[in-house]
């Protein structure tokens, strides 16, 4: 498992040769958000675990997000509603484009999301998955997401095994599979920052995480949820596996 990139390099755009972060496009550009932060249509499905809204971890995440929204460079981010907070276990399809990385094998490009989801659910029918996991956050990365790992070695190994089982049964093989890191997203970066701006965001992120680390050190997750989404603000649970 690889480590996340350097937050300063990420926030200043040193890692990607694009004029703006990759999720940000014009209204008709196929991205997740417009440059002004407006949420855009972005259809797909995914396997995730929502963060329990009654838990101390969720309360800590909301508190941290609120403080980020009051920070000096909050306008450079678009923030997600707390009801959407989740940890992705295995990414499904998103753009309904069979050329995308990790498209399920032997699935035609003319099929709609509902039909593709039926195929995916059939491929894992009868497969047994753990009824829950425990994870912990290790940092607040670049002012927008928590890096998450299993609460102990056994939990991390279990999560990685679940991903392998999903990959093999769904016949979906994303190129970044081995380097994938678990995370909980609070928002998306809208524009690249200057070095000074990025350093300020990183300092605030580190301070906020340190103040709230105890409440993020043991996060209980329920069963994995197979969800549909029409945008990044809501994930509709279709089935718990």
Image (cartoon, helix red, strand yellow):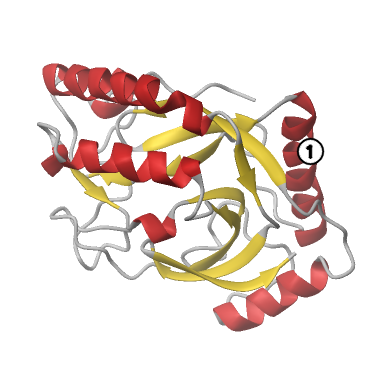
Q: Which residue is mark 1?
A: 158
Check disc 1 and report its element: helix, strand or loop: helix
Residue 218 visible to the viewer = yes
Residue 21, by quadrant, is: top left
In the shown orientation, is residue 219 left or right of residue 196?
Answer: right
In x, y percent, where is residue 101?
57, 51
At 82% across and 58% down in the image, what residue appears? 169
Q: Is residue 24 above or below residue 198?
A: below
In the image, 168 versus 165, the foreground residue is 165
In the image, 105 versus 155, the foreground residue is 155
At 49% across and 54% down in the image, what residue appears? 54
Q: Is residue 89 above or below residue 73?
A: below
Which quadrant holds the C terminus? bottom right
In the image, 121 versus 176, the foreground residue is 121
How many labels sit on residues? 1
Residue 138 visible to the viewer = no
In x, y percent, where is residue 209?
37, 25
Within 10 angstroms of label 1, few (less than 14), some, or many (20 or more) residues? some
Q: Is residue 82 above or below residue 182?
A: below
At 47% across and 69% down in the image, what residue appears? 229
At 26% across and 28% down in the image, what residue appears? 11
In x, y percent, where is residue 41?
33, 71
In the shown orientation, is residue 125 left or right of residue 121?
Answer: right
In x, y percent, where is residue 197?
13, 23
Which quadrant holds the N terminus? top right
Q: Is residue 220 above or below residue 7?
A: below
């Amino acid at each position: 498992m690889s480590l996340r990139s350097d937050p300063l390099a990420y926030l200043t755009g040193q890692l990607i040769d694009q004029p703006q972060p990759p999720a940000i496009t014009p209204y008709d550009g196929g991205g997740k958000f417009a440059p002004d932060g407006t949420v855009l249509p972005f259809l797909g499905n995914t396997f995730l675990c929502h963060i329990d809204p009654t838990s101390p971890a969720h309360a800590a995440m909301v508190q941290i997000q609120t403080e980020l929204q009051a920070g000096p460079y909050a306008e450079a981010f678009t923030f997600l509603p707390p009801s959407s907070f989740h940890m992705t276990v295995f990414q499904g399809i998103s753009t309904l484009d069979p050329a995308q990385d990790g498209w399920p094998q032997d699935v035609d490009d003319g099929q709609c999301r509902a039909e593709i989801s039926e195929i995916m659910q059939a491929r894992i029918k009868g497969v047994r998955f753990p009824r829950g996991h425990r994870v912990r956050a290790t940092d607040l990365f670049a002012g927008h997401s928590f890096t998450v790992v299993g609460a102990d070695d056994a939990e991390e190994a279990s999560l990685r095994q679940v991903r392998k089982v999903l990959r093999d049964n769904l016949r979906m093989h994303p190129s970044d599979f081995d380097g994938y890191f678990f995370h909980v997203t609070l928002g998306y970066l809208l524009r690249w920052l200057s070095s000074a701006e990025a350093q300020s965001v990183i300092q605030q992120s580190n301070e906020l995480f340190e103040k709230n680390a105890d409440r993020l050190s043991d996060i209980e997750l329920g069963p994995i949820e197979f969800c549909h989404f029409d945008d990044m603000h809501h994930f509709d649970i279709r089935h718990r596996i």
